[in-house]
Image (cartoon, rainbow, N blue to C red):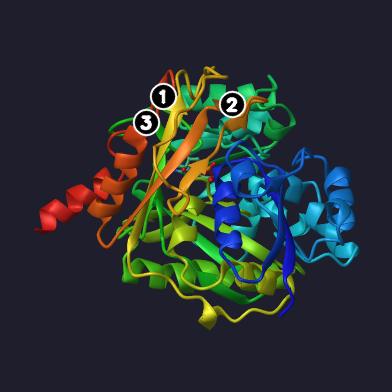
Amino acid sequence: MEKLDVLVVGSGGREHALVKAIKKSPLCGNLVCAPGNGGIALDCKTCPVSAEDIPGLVGLAESGNGGGRFSLVVCGPEVPLSLGLADELRSRGIPVYGPSKNGAVLEASKAFSKNFLKKYGIPTAVGENFTDSSLAEEYIRKAPFDVVIKASGLAAGKGVVIPENKDEAVEAACDMLENGMFGDSGREIVVEEKMEGEEASIMLVVCGRNYVMLPPSQDHKRVGDGDMGPNTGGMGAYAPAAVATEEVLKLVRERIVEPTLEGLEKEGIDYRGTLYVGIMITKDGPKVVEFNVRFGDPECQVLMPLIKSDVLELLYGVANGGFNPDEVRISEGYAAIVVVCAEGYPGKYRKGDEIFLPKGDYSEKWVVHAGTKSSPDGKILTNGGRVLGMVGLGGRLEEALENAYSLAGEVKFDGAFFRKDIGYRELRRESLRK
Ligand code: AMP
Ligand code: GLY
């Protein structure tokens, strides 16, 4: 097979992990990331086109940055997909990994997802969509369960409020519907039953009705140890997550994945890309918390190192409408990531501090950059709340976590902090089993 020139879109840790995995492929020709970050620039060429500049990205994909057009575009984040990047590229004959706009709506509209889940009988929280605050209030007051309130549109992971009581729920609904909290994204809301259980992330690589389920992972969304403090984009993750047992995964396939892919087909959506199913493992079995239309961040960073087969071949196969799920091979071991953040995150955080990375040759290690940039004099500076992700691998989860923590301990920059208890639920379960 000829070498493939690949454009990766995005600038976070997820995209750095994708770049690292794609670069390992013998099929990889030119590799460019737009816009990239300070660490991605150490691994491949970067191009300063924003991930939300659709005409700019289409122009770049066609011109090949001076070479021929790209053979494949891999889109990391959800926003370009919901703006129609994949549609624009496909209409020009450029293969793209990531769903078209009509598939991206699964993430861009929680109201659409709620209707979709109901229509196809897929287990999820009981709930309704509202644009009118008095109807929302009536529903909240009458509901025989505690509720959560969700802005329907994209809100960078911040659009969910878990109220303490019904008054707070009504207030949150009004804030979104009437007071413009979350802007247009909150003009429609979903009010649904608060589910109890443990969460896991199920990442599927989907091409129509064909799919491969990657190992289940678990994110840690709260900023503080013991799951305390405000929500973040994700402070750490590990895979495989044993809480999603074989039995749970069987139910996920039968009750969630297969009806979802059938539903997408019935809706005329030719889905090609990642489908991220956030599940709650409740006493009644796994239920859908959310759909995302891209890899999780930081989940992607622990999944990429666990894929033993060629990641580029997989993404290219999906983009072109033909891939063989049986060819995807997964390593036996574990991967864990500890995200090193800048002081203040997830609130207003420090920026521009010089980063001192672990000494020695770590090119083979998965030191993943998220919020970094390079300075003109060649230094790497902090440039985001989640700055770096340190990935550890191992035959056991404990070993993977030790390796991740040993790397995290070696990173130095002013104001650096990270959670000290990634994987704690699983380690606690393991110690109970012993
Ligand atoms: P989402 O953006 O829908 O993933 O929601 C963000 C987080 O809010 C999830 O990861 C859950 O921790 C929590 N959440 C969302 N929906 C529910 C629900 N119905 N019940 C309990 N927690 C929820
Ligand atoms: N880690 C959660 C997400 O990517 O949405």
Q: Is residue 127 rendered to the left or right of residue 362?
A: right
Q: Quadrant of residue 243?
A: bottom left
Q: Of marks 2 and 1, which one's residue comes earlier in the chain? A: 2
In this view, 411 is above or below 348: below
Q: Depth-wise, is mark 2 or mark 3 nearer the camera?
A: 2
The foreground one among 331 and 26 is: 26
The foreground one among 91 and 30 is: 30
Say which residue appears at 25% left-offset and 53% top-offset.
399
Callout 1 amino acid: Ala
Q: Of marks 2 and 3, which one's residue comes earlier in the chain? A: 2
Say which residue appears at 32% left-offset and 33% top-offset.
409
Instruction: Mark yes or no: residue 125 visible.
Output: no
In this view, 307 is above or below 376: below
Q: Is residue 282 rendered to the left or right of residue 380?
A: left
Q: Where residue 208 appears, x then y in whole percent?
A: 68, 74
What residue is disc 3 on?
Answer: 418
